[in-house]
Amino acid sequence: MPKLDKKKLKNPAGFKRGYAHKWAATILFTCFSLLIFSKAIAFAADKDTYGTASLMVIVERESGSVIVIDSSRHKFLGRVSGLGNLTHATVKFSKDARFAYVIARDASVSKIDLLSLKLVKKVRAGEDSVGGVMTQDGKYIALSNYLPGEVRILDAETLETVKTIPAEKELPDGKKVQSRVVGLLDAPGNLLIFSLMDGNATWIVDAGKKDFPVIKRFHDVGEMPYDALITPDGRFYLVGLLNSNWVGLLDTWEMSEVKKISTIRTKEARGAGDDAAPLWKIPHLKGWAIAGDYAVLPAIRREVALVYNTRDWSIVKEVPLVGTALYTVAGPDGRYVWVDLVGKNGDIIQVIDLKTLEVVKTFSPGKGATHPQFTPKGDAVYISLMDEDKIVVYDPLTFKKIKEFPAKRPSGIFSTERAHKFGM
């Protein structure tokens, strides 16, 4: 039998001195890393993580705050405060829906990170604002200001002002009068379209050019524009008029004129005699109800919803309501339009079936019911109950309440899906 070499037993061939210690250290490091990684996974599982594709950002007007709800789970996520006077506030979103921009009545703009629910930055961009819009390329936020009468354009990342466009009407004697700006919307071609409330005009700005030139000015479109909408494809811009019996229609493909589309089907004068109703509040058009071949708009001073054929913009029907409409909002499938009312019967929601063009449901979710907003695929509807300090969620097929959330005098409800829609 061969004699064993004790030295080789202590240090086998190819097994260098110190290697065993390195090998053991590697094993220990790997085990430690796996432990840390597993702890991180457990922490992530415990932490309430979410995406931004189906969030609802809801304005609490008096308290100057917004609450954020995950509408895919109907779960309250948090509140962001210190946003200013949120009467008539609106919310716009970045292209990736990561950030919300809250535009307050005092013209302050608050940029909120929707993943951390933190206020990133807040600036003042005027004195009195009634809303704004994100440009098609997502680079700028534009404000429609009452005071000073202008469009104010901010860099979406820094919120620094990059351009102000005075909304001035030139009088026959050469004097210029500044007008309040309304109906500011984005359109294909990276355009901005807005109307002059005191100038009876509609202007178009090219937001794709460095100096943001006004490329078109249409005058005498109608008396006192108050709001506007743009069709989902971005082709038609409709401006509502307080003191004219028509809406102004601009075809963004043609860019030749603002046509007058009647708001009267059978009467010579809108809101005359027994048909007249008090103007409790100016209707809003930006929550548009455009579905298939129909457009459903709230009427001024009348208790009807106006149904248009979007092929030739003729009035198809006036649908009777039990009050004056504030918003008309279509579900994603285009079958039903939910209408909230103000003034008389202001707690009521009515639902119009676009198959029959009739009201098929009238109900009261609660006091001060307003601002119906569908989830992205229309499986639920969120409604503000301003006078009950809560948000209620309804099933749109059964009209049964799914859930409710406490809120401080809630008003506007804005879904992050608006990030991918013109004029929203």
Image: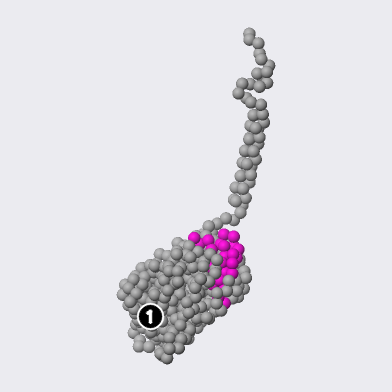
Image coords of residue 93 (percent x, y) = 50, 65
| Residue toward you, 231 or 137 | 137
Residue that badge 1 annotates: 218
Say what secondary structure mark 1 lies in: strand
As shown in the figure, which amino acid type bears the numbered disc 1?
Phe
**Residue 376 at x, y percent in the picture:** 46, 63
Residue 264 seen in render: yes
- Residue at 50% in and 62% down: 97
Which quadrant holds residue 210? bottom left
Quick check: can you spot residue 387? no
Viewed as shown, does residue 113 lie left or right of 265? Answer: right
Locate residue 396, reporting x and y percent: 46, 66
Q: Is residue 107 magenta?
A: yes
Looking at the image, which residue is at 38% across and 88% down? 269
Q: Nearer the viewer, residue 23 or 174?
A: 174
**Span of residues in magenta:** 96-122
Which colour style is shown? one colour
Q: State the residue at coordinates (43%, 79%).
A: 195
